[in-house]
Structure formats: C-alpha cells, structure tokens
Amino acid sequence: MTESTPPTPPPGTRRPGGRTARTRAAVRDAVLSGLADHGYPGLTVEYVADHSGVHKTTLYRRWGGLEGLVADALDLAGEDTWTPPDTGSLEGDLRALAHEVVDAFTDDAAAAAPTAFIGAAFQSERAEQALRAFYAERFTRCEAVVARAVARGEATADVDAGALVRAVSAPLMLRLFITREPIDGELADQSAAAALAATRAGAFTRR
Amino acid sequence: MTESTPPTPPPGTRRPGGRTARTRAAVRDAVLSGLADHGYPGLTVEYVADHSGVHKTTLYRRWGGLEGLVADALDLAGEDTWTPPDTGSLEGDLRALAHEVVDAFTDDAAAAAPTAFIGAAFQSERAEQALRAFYAERFTRCEAVVARAVARGEATADVDAGALVRAVSAPLMLRLFITREPIDGELADQSAAAALAATRAGAFTRR
C-alpha cells in the first residue's frame, strides 16, 4: 500500500482481537464497500447494518452515526502493516512509491474507497480529521526511504523528509482529485525524478 | 487570480452583455455564495432562486438543475481576465504563483467557493467535467511564465510547461485537500524552489 492506496489492510495484517475486533472489521468492510458503491454521503447507516450484520442501534450506540463509522473505518485502515518500497536506492524507492500511487488509483475497484474518503473530508469534519491522521501516519512511514538514503549518503541529514515524500505523490494527487486529469507510469517517473532532482539541488533542505 | 483562487471574476472583468448576461452573473453569484455557505450538496436550487431573484422554473429550464448551475458557475468563472505573474524571472514567477495559491486558500472567504467546487467534483460528473475544463484553461494561462523563461534562455524549449506549472501548486493542493495540512509562505517558496530545481535538472524535459 502507498500513502494513497485503499485503506483496507491486506489479509493477515488485521490486528488480533476477539468478537469486538471482528465486529469492528465487519463494520469497517461494510463502510468501505458502501463508500465504493455509493460514495459519501450516499452511504447510509442502514447500508452498513445490512452489509455488516450489525444492528443499526448498535452502530448508532458505538459509532454515533455515519461520520463516526467513516472516521473509524479510516482509523482502522491506518492499522495495517504497509511499509514503503526498499529498492536499495533513493531514486528506486521514490519511483516505486510514485508507481504505487498510479497503480492504486488507476484500478477503479482499489481507488473507490480512498477516493470516497478524500471526498468525505469535504463534507465531514470528523472524516477530515481522520484523513489528516491517516496521511500523517502514512507519510511518516514513507520517510523511511529518506532515512535509508541519508544512511547511504544519497541525501543529507538536514533534508525535509516529509516534504520530499509528499512531493513525489503531489503531482499525481493534484491530477487525480483537483484538475481531474489522467495519470500514468510516465507521470510517476517524472514526479519521482523531479522530487529527486529537487532534493539533490537542496530545495528540500531545512533552513 | 491563480489557477486555484476563487473562480469569481474581479469587478470589471465580467463580459459585457445584456439581460441574459446579467441574469447568468446573478445566478452565478448566488451559486458561489451558496457553495461558500453550504458547500455541495448543501446547495439547493431554492437557495439560488432566493439569492438570484431568478424564478426556480427558469433555473430548471435554463440550467436543468443543481449540477447544471454549479457547472455553469464554474464555466463562467473561467471567463475572467487573470494572467500569471510576470516578475522578470522564472524563479520570481514560480514563487509568485505559489504565493497566490497560499494567499487564496488561507483566506477563508476566498477559499470557500473553489473548495466547494473541488468537493462537488467528487459527487457530480458535470462538476468534475467543469472543474477539469477550468483547471486545464487556467494552467494553460500559467504556461506563459514558461514561454517567457524559454525566451529569456532560463529554460529549454523542450520543457514540459504544463508539468512544471502544475508542480508548483501540487504540494500546496495536496496539503489543502488530501492530507489536510496547513500551508504557508515558506511552503510556497519550497514548492517553487523544488519545481525550479527540477526544471534546471531536466526532470520536466520532454522525452
């Protein structure tokens, strides 16, 4: 998973847990499929109840309502085991990160839920907060590629790792969700190359 | 205006026109204030009728409904006279462009309508198409800064001007609408510096 792939943990990565964890996961899965099918606010608590087998009154009691369900699904999505690519070079890692974004968002099924989460943040403050927390944690994981590059002497220790990893996916996310333009592997390579060149030129060096 | 400032033409830039143009502008203004107040889909045809003084039946007949109203407001927004900054250097122009984005979106009143347009595109295909057309035209205007840089010998003629100008605002828009992080002038400078460094390193050179 990249910082922008569907926030559904791959099989086997779910935290161990009992009935509560299973219920939460079932509800999360229903929220994701609902967001994929109907987007936000097309999603309803009724849909989540029908698709999770959890009673509506339980959903309202434990999640408060739709906003709480969406926020919790995003929180749970952050509890996966994804780690950034480790290709042995900063250039390889940045290119692999960019391609993961393209691969995730050019697969309609994979893109549906994360796209709906990003859209939900325009209408729900709780979704916005959950999205902010999700990406903050996701990009923090991405900073490992910069730490390895520093250790290899490919970047200086004073590089702004957060800015660098965000710069890789920014041109892709801009086209996906703002300018609504197509993205492809060539654009992924260009984004990675631009971020790498900017890093080498010191554009991300902390003042 | 930047490619991302509120799509309201500054005073005096409205196309000359008779009653039809005035009606369209009044309806556009009502849509913008409605989006600013309620976002999308909080906006209703009733609201537009009340705030434009144009009868609901006329709105439905001429615009088809809410999606048509939003799309037309965005189309009309593209009919302004904004041109990109011309500071005399590519570095100055890119920095000025980035700062225009920050200035526009850190002003809550100015940011409300464009933010709502971007959010509407997640729910309305017509809004998505209108947004795509708006930004395509907006970024085409921005390419003038690259053409001037080429003329001054600051960039080669084979630079991907569209990719370069998008790279300047991409890190800002990512934080505004995806990761939901704050942006400031320092980030604007960093984005412009990164785009400039990538350009000088040939990262935006067409293959």
Image (cartoon, coloured by chain):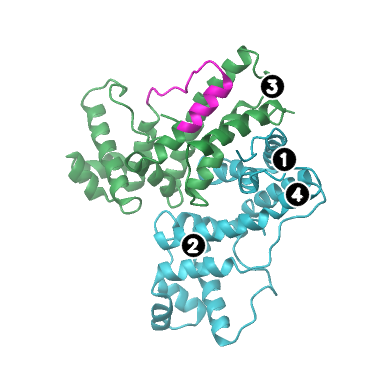
Chain colours: A green, B cyan
CA separation, marks 4 and 2? 27 Å
Please check the rendered image and state whether residue B175 is part of the magenta-colored stretch, yes or no.
Answer: no
Mark 2 or mark 3, whichever is nearer to me: 2
Q: Which residue is mark 3?
A: A158
**Vertical position of residue A206 compared to residue A190: above or below:** above
Question: Residue A10: where, in percent of width, then height?
Answer: 32, 27
Tell me if A144 is positioned left or right of B61 in this view: right
Asked if badge 1 and badge 2 are on a common chain, one would say yes
Question: Residue A106 falls in which quadrant of the image?
Answer: top left
Question: Residue A19: where, in percent of width, then height?
Answer: 20, 26
Please say if the residues under marks 3 and 1 sit with CB atoms less than 8 Å apart.
no
Tell me if A35 is positioned left or right of B191 in this view: left
**Vertical position of residue B109 compared to residue A71: above or below:** below
Disc 4 chain ID? B
Ranked by sequence position, the earlier of labels 4 and 2 is 4
Local SS, label 1: helix
Asked if badge 4 and badge 3 are on a common chain, one would say no
Q: Which residue is mark 2?
A: B130
Local SS, label 4: helix
Q: Nearer the viewer, residue A65 or B174?
A: B174
